[in-house]
Image: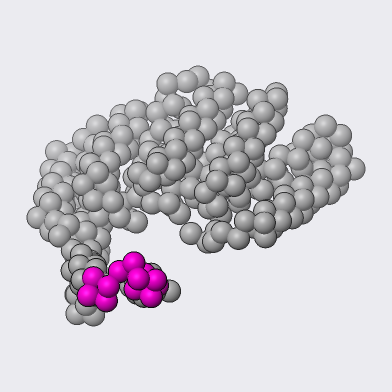
Amino acid sequence: MTETGKLDAALNSLVHDGSLSADQADLVRQRFADTEEPTDSRKSVLAEIAGYLGGAFVVIATVIVTANKWDAFSQTQRGIIFSALALSLFALAIFVGTSTAVKARLSGVLYSLAAVSTTGTLAVIDPQQDAPTIAFLGGTAVALIGFYRVQTFVGHVFLYGYIFISGIMAVSDLTPDGAGAQIFIGTFLLILGSAWIFFTYKEQVDRLLGYLFGGATLFIATQVLFFRTEHLLSYLSMIAVACATAWLYLRVHAWPLVLTSVATTTVGVGEFVAETLGGSIGSALGLFAAGAALVTTSLLALRNKRENPVEIAQ
C-alpha cells in the first residue's frame, strides 16, 4: 500500500470513529499532497539518461585523445589536465545543485567523478612510492565533501570504496610487512565496519547499503586476521562479529546483518574444525561443521521471523 493509501485508510477510520470530521480529513489530505515531493516526470528521467550518456561519450572521447597524446605531455601538463577536470566536475556539481531528485543524483555522480579526477591529479603530480596513498586520501576527501552535500547511491558507493581502499593503503604504509601488518589491517577493517553499521543505525547513511557495506567489511576483517600463524584473534573476532550482528538483526531486522552473522558463523566453524584436526578428514569434518552451522543459524533466523513477522527485505 502506498503512503497516500495508508493515509486515506487512517483518515477514513478516524472519520468513522468520530474523531475527525470529513472536512478535517480533507484538509489533512490537501496538506499532505502539498508537502509530497514531486515525482520525476518521464521527460526529466529521459533527460537525465541522455545527460549521463552524453557525459560518458565526452569522457570516453577525452580519454582516447589524451591517451594518444599522453607520452607527449610533460608531468606538469598531465597534472594540469587532471586538475582542470577535477575542478570542472566539482564546480559543475555545485552548479547543478540538489533542488530536485534528478539534479541530486546528477550532482552525486559529478562529485564522485571529481573524486576520481582528484586521485588522478595527485598521482600524476607526485609519482613517488607513497603517492598512491596520498592520491586516494585526496579522493576520499573530495568524495566525503560530495556526500556531505548530497547523499546519493553513487556517492555512498564511491565514498565507502575510497575510505576502504585508502585506509588499507595508509595502514600498510605505516606498519611493517609480515603477519603484524595483517593485525593492523584487520583491526582497521573491524573499526570501519563497526563504525559504518553504527552510522547506519543512527540513520546517517542509506540503510541497505550501510548495513551491507559494514557487514561485508566485518566478515573480510575476520578472514584477514585468520591468515596468520596464530588464529586465536581471528576466532575471537568471528565470535564477536557473529553475535553482534545477530543481536542487532533482532532489533532492526535488516537482512545484511543476518547474512553477515550466518556467513561468519559458517566459515568460522569450518575453519576452526579444519585447522584443529588437519588433514583430509579434518577438512571433511570442517565442511560438515560449516554446513551444520549454516543450517542451524538459518533455522534460528526463520524461527525468529515467524515469531516476529517484521518485514526484513529493507
Residue 186 in view: yes
Who's the residue at 61% across and 50% down the image? 258
Q: Quadrant of residue 54?
A: bottom left
Q: Position of residue 125 (x, y in %)?
A: 21, 35
Residue 223 in view: no
Q: In this view, does 180 lie to the left or right of 66?
A: right
Who's the residue at 86% across and 44% down the image? 285
Magenta range is: 13-24
Above/below status of 135 relative to 149: above
Dominant secondary structure (helix, strand or loop) of the stretch shown in magenta: helix
Above/below status of 215 relative to 154: above
**Total tally of numbered discs in the picture:** 0
Who's the residue at 15% across and 44% down the image? 83
Q: Where is residue 79 in the image (x, y as percent from the top left)?
A: 17, 41
Q: Position of residue 93 (x, y in %)?
A: 16, 54
Q: Is residue 20 magenta?
A: yes
**In which quadrant is the N terminus drawn?**
bottom left
Who's the residue at 14% across and 56% down the image? 97
Q: In which quarter of the image is residue 295?
A: bottom right
Name the residue nearer the viewer: 67 or 13: 13
Tell me the colour scheme of the image: one colour
Q: Where is residue 233 in the image (x, y as percent from the top left)?
A: 65, 25
Name the residue nearer the viewer: 159 or 245: 245
Q: Which residue reaches farthest right?
A: 281
Q: In this view, does 88 lie to the left or right of 205?
A: left
Q: Which residue reaches farthest front?
A: 18
